Amino acid sequence: FIADFVGDSNMFDGRVRALNAASASITLAGGDLTTDARVDAAVSTGDTTTVALRFEDISIQRSGLTRNTVYPGEITETIFEGDQILYTVDITGGLSLKIREAHTQGGTVLERGQTVEVGWDADDVMTFPD
């Protein structure tokens, strides 16, 4: 159900690490990575949750990325989808992300094997308490 609701998204298991007024710090799969997330539902520290990041809400570039959460990664796949490119990026901590971005003629295309930075903001992260 969740996947149908949020569209093309990266889905991860998470655990709420800390809370403040309208957001939470969430530890992602395996405990090596954390992200800040907007929290709409009542959650408590220690609760498990499903974390969703839409493909198009994640930024990707070679370096210098300025987003709330940023991790280094390596491109493992580049797929052209008409006017869009779908990247698969393995990031620190063993997670793999799908990232979709617009492609314009003559625009930069990142290649398999390139080291990149990927990132997102707390408002891009959807959480669904378990």
Image: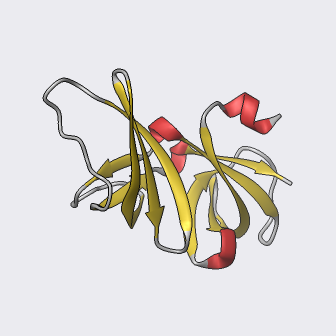
Nearest the viewer among 86 and 4 is: 86
Taking the view exactly as shown, the residue that stands out farthest to the left is: 106
Position of residue 70 relative to residue 100, above or below, is below
Residue 53 image position (x, y, % from top left): 57, 46
Residue furthest to the right in view is: 130
- The residue nearer to you, when weighing 21 against 54, is 54
In this picture, residue 130 sits left or right of residue 93: right
Q: Position of residue 92 (x, y in %)?
A: 47, 73
Q: Which percent across, then down, holds residue 8? A: 60, 34
Position in image of residue 13 (x %, y %): 73, 61
Left or right position of 117 against 95: left
Residue at x 61% of width, y 40% of height? 9
Residue found 73% across the figure and 36% down from its top: 3
- Above or below, 13 against 46 in this view is above
Left or right relative to 21: residue 5: right
In the image, residue 34 above or below residue 86: below
* Residue appearing at x 86%, y 54% in the figure: 130
The answer to whether residue 27 is above or below residue 62 is: below
Q: Kindly indicate the quadrant of the structure image that contains residue 58.
A: top left
Is 7 on the left or on the right of 118, as rendered?
right
Task: Tell me which residue sits at (80%, 72%) in the image.
Answer: 46
Colour scheme in use = secondary structure
Q: How many marks?
A: 0
User: In which quadrant will I find the N terminus?
Assistant: top right
